[in-house]
Amino acid sequence: MARFATCRYPVGMAQVHHLTKTALERLQAEFHDLTTRGRIEVADKIERAREMGDLKENGDYHAAKDEQGHMEGRIRHLESILENHVLVETADGDVVGPGKLVTLSIDGDEPETYYLGSREEKFAGAATMTPESALGQAILGRGINETAEYETPNGSKLNVTIISVELP
């Protein structure tokens, strides 16, 4: 399990999302689908449920409105990501950077593999770590066999050794 905290941003300061070209294209396609087909389908469900009568006790209506709320939340989230992203150009090499899989040993524990990038990208067998997180910042730019000191949110210090760095 990951032992680092998520990065918090002051009010009004947008988080920058590091995306590979593949992730960017996938998120753009999802955004387009939700803002077109998704909205039309949910509106149709709401309309069909309204036709059933009394809205106070109409489970279909409430379910459709809940679905609409969740979908609109996802649309706003995707919009924020697409407006505040950096396209990651990953280069082969042994230096830790966004868009790479990094295997670490924290204080001599069993190695753990992380994908360094946006939370929107997932890789089997690897937790996702953002470059803005405290641990992400501690290892960014370091190479294989280098050690970095990382301060946890509770103030304790951990030594992190980079075991491997590779492209996904």
Image (cartoon, rainbow, N blue to C red):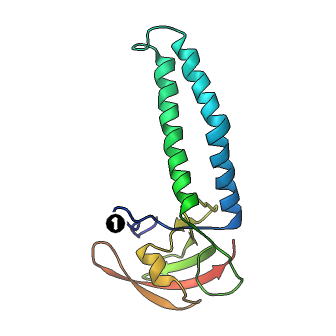
Q: Height in image: 6 above or below 165?
A: above
- State which quarter of the image contains the C terminus: bottom right
x and y percent of residue 38 in the render? 63, 36
Q: Secondary structure at mark 1?
A: loop
Extreme residue in the left direction? 155
- 157 on left or right of 98: left
Q: Height in image: 102 above or below 32?
A: below
x and y percent of residue 102 in the render? 59, 77
Residue drawn at (60%, 34%) of the image: 39
Quadrant of the rendered structure where residue 99 is? bottom right
x and y percent of residue 77 in the render? 51, 51
x and y percent of residue 163 in the render? 58, 84
| Depth order, front residue of 115/40 | 40
- 149 on left or right of 115: left
Quadrant of the rendered structure where residue 83 is? bottom right
Residue drawn at (55%, 10%) of the image: 51
| Depth order, front residue of 103/133 | 133
| Depth order, front residue of 95/106 | 95
Marker count (numbered) = 1
**Mark 1 packing: few (<14 Cα in 10 Å), some, or many (20+)?**
few
Quadrant of the rendered structure where residue 156 is? bottom left
Residue drawn at (68%, 78%) of the image: 90
Extreme residue in the top direction? 53
| Depth order, front residue of 166/34 | 34
Q: Amino acid at mark 1?
A: Pro
Q: Which residue is mark 1?
A: 10
